[in-house]
Image (cartoon, rainbow, N blue to C red):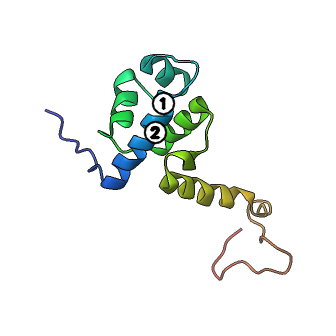
Amino acid sequence: MNDQKRAAVTDENREESRRLRALWEVRSPRVSQAEFGETFDIGSQAAVGHFLNGNSAISMKAAKGFARGLGCDLSAFSERLARQAAEIASLTQSAAPGPVGEPVSPGERPPDGYVR
């Protein structure tokens, strides 16, 4: 018996799956769930089916694959995941820090106890 517990699927998760299913139904070209899952790194046919049917909350990895495969933005089916992706992206778009061990900006002092 598997002792791992799957996270509870919320009403928000089910609504995301409903919107994803609507996009899935009008996709072109029409490929199988198994082929789609493998091509877009979502997982097995069963995983694709679980996401489309609302049996599993859509993960960021799966959302990325569905968005790529369906040619849509994450927000087309999940505002929640679109916000998370935007937050993560904002961290990569800020000014890059200086070399390791150097203060980020000129004149900035490293914290007390900092060892180079």
Q: Using residue 82 as the reference point, say whether residue 105 is left or right of it.
A: right
Q: Is residue 111 above or below residue 92?
A: below
Instruction: Tell me where residue 25 appears, x and y as whole percent.
Output: 46, 28
Q: Mark 1 is on which residue type?
A: Trp
Instruction: Tell me where residue 80 appears, x and y as whole percent.
Output: 48, 56
Instruction: Tell me where residue 94 appears, x and y as whole percent.
Output: 75, 63
> Taking the image as drawn, is residue 7 in sight?
yes
Q: Quadrant of the C terminus?
A: bottom right
Q: Mark 2 is on which residue type?
A: Leu
Name the residue: 50% across, 16% down: 31
Q: Using residue 102 as the reference point, say whether residue 19 is left or right of it.
A: left
Write down the residue under mark 1.
Answer: 24
**Is the C-beta separation of discs 2 and 1 under 8 Å?**
yes
Instruction: Tell me where residue 87 appears, x and y as whole percent.
Output: 60, 60
Q: Is residue 66 above or below residue 74?
A: above
Q: Is residue 32 above or below residue 8?
A: above
Q: Tell me the SS state at disc 1.
A: helix
Q: Tell me the SS state at disc 2.
A: helix
Name the residue: 26% across, 50% down: 8
Q: Residues within 10 Å of mark 1 (few under 14, many from 20)?
A: some
Task: Identify the residue at the far left of this view.
Answer: 1
Name the residue: 49% across, 50% down: 78
